[in-house]
Image (cartoon, helix red, strand yellow):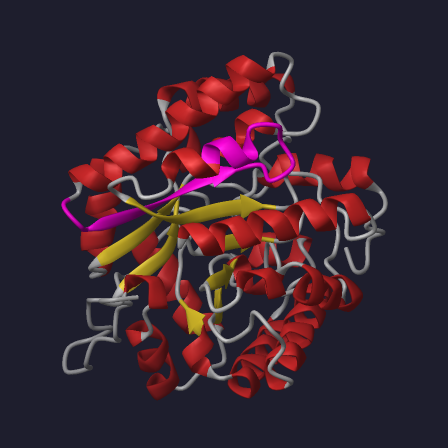
C-alpha cells in the first residue's frame, strides 16, 4: 500500500468507503482494562484523561451503513462488527468508564451524507447532514460535559459554508471534523486546495478547532503535506488543528511515517499554522492481522514512536476511534503494549489534553 498514486481517485475513494473514514480491525478476544493491574502488587498503567477520537451514529446513518454492507460485504474490511450494533451514548459512557477515561471527543460522521457522487438529492443530503450533526451535539449536551462534539462537513459540498455558519457558537459545539479522503481531496487540484484553505480560514474566524483526517486509501505524500501546510494549514493561524490517526488512516505504514516526518519538518521550521498543530494516534496501532494487511508492523511502530519523540510528545494525544476497533479499554491496552514507549512517556501521553479542552482556550 506504499505510495499508491493519489491521482487514482477511484481506487482511493473505494478504499475510503471500505474504511469509512474511521479505522478498524478485528476485536481483541480478551484484554485487561488499563485501570486494572496486570498482576497483584503491580501498579496499574495510567489511563488517558481524554479519548480524543470516538464516533456515534444516528439511526439514519446506521440504516445507510447496513445498506452498504448488504451491497458490498467487503466495504467495511478491517472494521469491528461493533459499528453495526448501533452503539448509543450510554454505550460510549460505559466504555469510557471501563477504560478509566474521564472525557471523550465525539467526531460526527455527517460528511457521509455528502460523499462525492452519492448525494442524488443535494437538499435531502444537506438535511440528513444537519440531522446527523444535531444527533452528535445533542449526545454531547446530554452527557453534561463528559463528551464534547465536533460537527462535520464535506468542505467541497455546496452546503459546506452554510453548515459551518449554522453551528458557529451553538451550545455543545466545540469544533469541526473534516475527512479529506472521503471528500475526494486531491492536492493536485488548485481549486480544491483553495476551497479547503477558505474553510480553514472560516473555521479560524468562527473559533472552531479542526480535526482533519487526511488520507483515503492512497498515501498523503510529503509533497502533499508540504502543500497542505503552506496553502491550507497556514489559513488556520493559531487555531488548534488535530491531525487524525497520526497523519495516516490505519496502522503505521511507510506512507504514514513519511507524512508525520513532513509535518515534523514543518513544525521545526515554525511554518504558519503549526503553532497549535497536534496529532491524535487513534488507529496507528492495529490488531496483528489487520496491521499486517495494512502494511504496518512493530518495526514501523518503532519508527512512528521515534518521530513522536523528535516532534515532541506534547503534540500527541490519545484516541481510540471507538467503536471501529472494538471496546476502548482493550484497544488502549493494545496501544500501550505495541507502541515502543517507556512508562514515563505513556504517562505523559495519557495526561496530554488538546488545547481546545483547556479552560480559556
**Left or right: 248 as drawn, with respect to 191:** left
Vertical side of 130 occupied by 67: above or below: above
Q: Quadrant of residue 11?
A: top right
Q: Residue at x 65, y 21 (%)?
A: 118
Which quadrant: the N terminus? bottom right
Instruction: Give residue 57's position: percent from left, percent from top.
Output: 38, 31
**Left or right: 115 as drawn, with respect to 337:** right
Q: Residue at x 54, y 25 (%)?
A: 113
Instruction: Give residue 169's position: percent from left, percent from top.
Output: 31, 44
Asked if residue 236 shows in the view, the reply is yes
**Viewer-side residue, 240 vs 101:** 240
**Viewer-side residue, 233 vs 141:** 233
Q: Residue at x 17, y 50 (%)?
A: 145
Asked if residue 109 shows in the view, the reply is no
Instruction: Give residue 85's position: percent from left, percent from top.
Output: 36, 29
**Viewer-side residue, 337 vs 209:** 209
Q: Is residue 147 magenta?
A: yes
Which quadrant: the C terminus? bottom left
Instruction: Give residue 77's position: percent from left, percent from top.
Output: 60, 38
Vertical side of 134 occupied by 308: above or below: below
Q: Which region of the structure is painted magenta?
A: 144-163
**Viewer-side residue, 190 vs 16:** 190
Vertical side of 71 occupied by 264: above or below: below
Amino acid at each position: 500500500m506504499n505510495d499508491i498514486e493519489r491521482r487514482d481517485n477511484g481506487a482511493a475513494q473505494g478504499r475510503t468507503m471500505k474504511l469509512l473514514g474511521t479505522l478498524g480491525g478485528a476485536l481483541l478476544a480478551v484484554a485487561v482494562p488499563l485501570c486494572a493491574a496486570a498482576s497483584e502488587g503491580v501498579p496499574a498503567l495510567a489511563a488517558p484523561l481524554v479519548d480524543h477520537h470516538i464516533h456515534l451514529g444516528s439511526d439514519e446513518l446506521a440504516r445507510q451503513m447496513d445498506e452498504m454492507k448488504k451491497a458490498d460485504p467487503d466495504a467495511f474490511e478491517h472494521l469491528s462488527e461493533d459499528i453495526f450494533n448501533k452503539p448509543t451514548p450510554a454505550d460510549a459512557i460505559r466504555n469510557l468508564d471501563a477504560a478509566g477515561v474521564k472525557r471523550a471527543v465525539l467526531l460526527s460522521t455527517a460528511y457521509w451524507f455528502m460523499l462525492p457522487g452519492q448525494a442524488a438529492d443535494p437538499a435531502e443530503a444537506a438535511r440528513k447532514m444537519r440531522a446527523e450533526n444535531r444527533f452528535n451535539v445533542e449526545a454531547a449536551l446530554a452527557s453534561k460535559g463528559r463528551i464534547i462534539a465536533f460537527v462535520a462537513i464535506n468542505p467541497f459540498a455546496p452546503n459546506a459554508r452554510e453548515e459551518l455558519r449554522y453551528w458557529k457558537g451553538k451550545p455543545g459545539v466545540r469544533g469541526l471534523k473534516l475527512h479529506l479522503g472521503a471528500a475526494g481531496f486531491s492536492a493536485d487540484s488548485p481549486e480544491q486546495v483553495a476551497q479547503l484553505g477558505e474553510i480553514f480560514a472560516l473555521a479560524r474566524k468562527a473559533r472552531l478547532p479542526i480535526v482533519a483526517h487526511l488520507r483515503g486509501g492512497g498515501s498523503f505524500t510529503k509533497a502533499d503535506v508540504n502543500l497542505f501546510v503552506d496553502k491550507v494549514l497556514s489559513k488556520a493561524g493559531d487555531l488548534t488543528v488535530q491531525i487524525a490517526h497520526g497523519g495516516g488512516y490505519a496502522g503505521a505504514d511507510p506512507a504514514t511515517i513519511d507524512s508525520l516526518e513532513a509535518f515534523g519538518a514543518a513544525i521545526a521550521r515554525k511554518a504558519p499554522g503549526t503553532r497549535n498543530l497536534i496529532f491524535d494516534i487513534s488507529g496507528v496501532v492495529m490488531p496483528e492481522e489487520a496491521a499486517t494487511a495494512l502494511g504496518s508492523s512493530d518495526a514501523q511502530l518503532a519508527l512512528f514512536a521515534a518521530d513522536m519523540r523528535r516532534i515532541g510528545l506534547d503534540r500527541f494525544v490519545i484516541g481510540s476511534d471507538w467503536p471501529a476497533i472494538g471496546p476502548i479499554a482493550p484497544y488502549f491496552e493494545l496501544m500501550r503494549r505495541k507502541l515502543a514507549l517507556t512508562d514515563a512517556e505513556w504517562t505523559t501521553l495519557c495526561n496530554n489534553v488538546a488545547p481546545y479542552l483547556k479552560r480559556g482556550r
